[in-house]
Amino acid sequence: MAGREILNKMKEKACFSTPVTPEAGKGKSKFSKNITHGFYLEKGKSNHAMEDCLVSEFKKLDDHELGLFAIFDGHMGHDVAKYLQGNLFNNILKQQHDFWTDTEKALRRAYKTTDNEILEQSFHLGKGGSTAVTAVLMDGHKLVVANVGDSRAIICKKGVAYQISVDHEPGKEKSTIEKKGGFVSNIPGDVPRVDGQLAVARAFGDKSLKRHLSSEPDVAIEMVDDEVEFIILASDGLWKVMSNQEAVESIRNTKSAQSAAKHLVEEAVSRKSKDDISCIVVRFQ
């Protein structure tokens, strides 16, 4: 039994550098039997090792329960994504007072602190970076989402998909990047890139681009009421080939959160997505 519990905890926080098969896991709230979560990761067809990491767990804090969910999509290696996996939520929860009184402030400060830590350790972590989308579910009722980059969070209300994160595309933030002295390339056949390199306008790490690249998150707060059916967090490998509404409709009748996450990943692969794909589904039954 102890060995199985250890394995489950290892799967709850998953970052796989050299996976041979897809990885999956699931769990549920101890405060509310109606809330379950599941995740699924699959390596893409690129030659590099798996660069996605995630966190998917419920954590008791004093008399409260927090659902901690995150997708970290690394680029130029998985070291920064793995660092985020182990440290970002810790930096958020260290701010006990602000976390409960001003959650948005605590998230923004933690994002900045964690990015500074990554830049200070760039000699060990390398010159790569990572996008991030995080969701904190507070006592099953309040959902706080923050993100940098193009991993995405979707909430389903009565069958309708609502995007609660912001895709930070270089083309949309061109003027800000140029004011910092950078440029956005727009080569035919390619996506816009910061300084001709990075296809997102915000990310953790990327020390060589940091003067022109922001790690400031967009933050959104949603109250979970009876209209909310589930939320989806996924890396851009999913969203490149599926619309928000398509994703919602494809899993709306899937009762298992883990089966829903698996279905989304497999559907993206069937649609020829070649990127690493990681997905979390949190279901409110």
Image: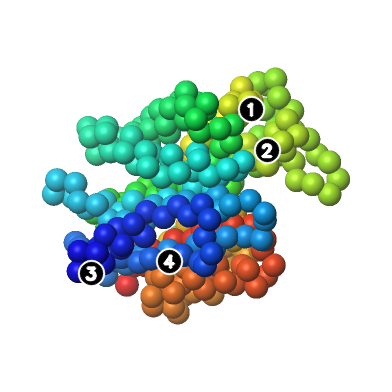
Q: What amino acid is found at the position of numbered circle 2 in the picture?
A: Leu
- Circle 2 is placed at which residue position? 198
Instruction: Judge left or right: residue 152 versus residue 195.
Output: left
**Inter-mark Cα distance, 2 to 3:** 42 Å
- Circle 3 is placed at which residue position? 33
**Inter-mark Cα distance, 1 to 4:** 34 Å
In the depicted view, which residue is nearer to us: 228 or 107? 107
Contact (CB < 8 A) between labels 1 and 2?
Answer: yes
Instruction: Report the disc number at residue 24.
Output: 4
Q: Earlier in the sequence, mark 2 or mark 3?
A: 3
Q: Earlier in the sequence, mark 1 or mark 4?
A: 4
- Circle 1 is placed at which residue position? 209
Q: What amino acid is found at the position of numbered circle 3 in the picture?
A: Lys
Residue 204, above or below 20? above
**Display coloring:** rainbow
Instruction: Report the disc number at residue 201.
Output: none
Q: Which mark is nearer the camera, 4 or 2?
A: 4
The quarter of the rendered structure image containing the C terminus is bottom left
In the depicted view, which residue is nearer to us: 125 or 99? 125
Q: Position of residue 157 (x, y in %)?
A: 43, 65
Q: Position of residue 245 (x, y in %)?
A: 57, 67
Q: Position of residue 279 (x, y in %)?
A: 49, 61
Mark 2: few/some/many CA within 10 Å (<14, 14-19, 20+) = many
Q: What amino acid is found at the position of numbered circle 4 in the picture?
A: Ala
Could you tell me which residue is drawn at 80 percent across and 39 percent down? 186
Residue 114, above or below 86? above
Query: Is residue 228 visible in the rendered structure shown here?
Result: no
Q: Earlier in the sequence, mark 1 or mark 2?
A: 2
Q: Earlier in the sequence, mark 3 or mark 4?
A: 4
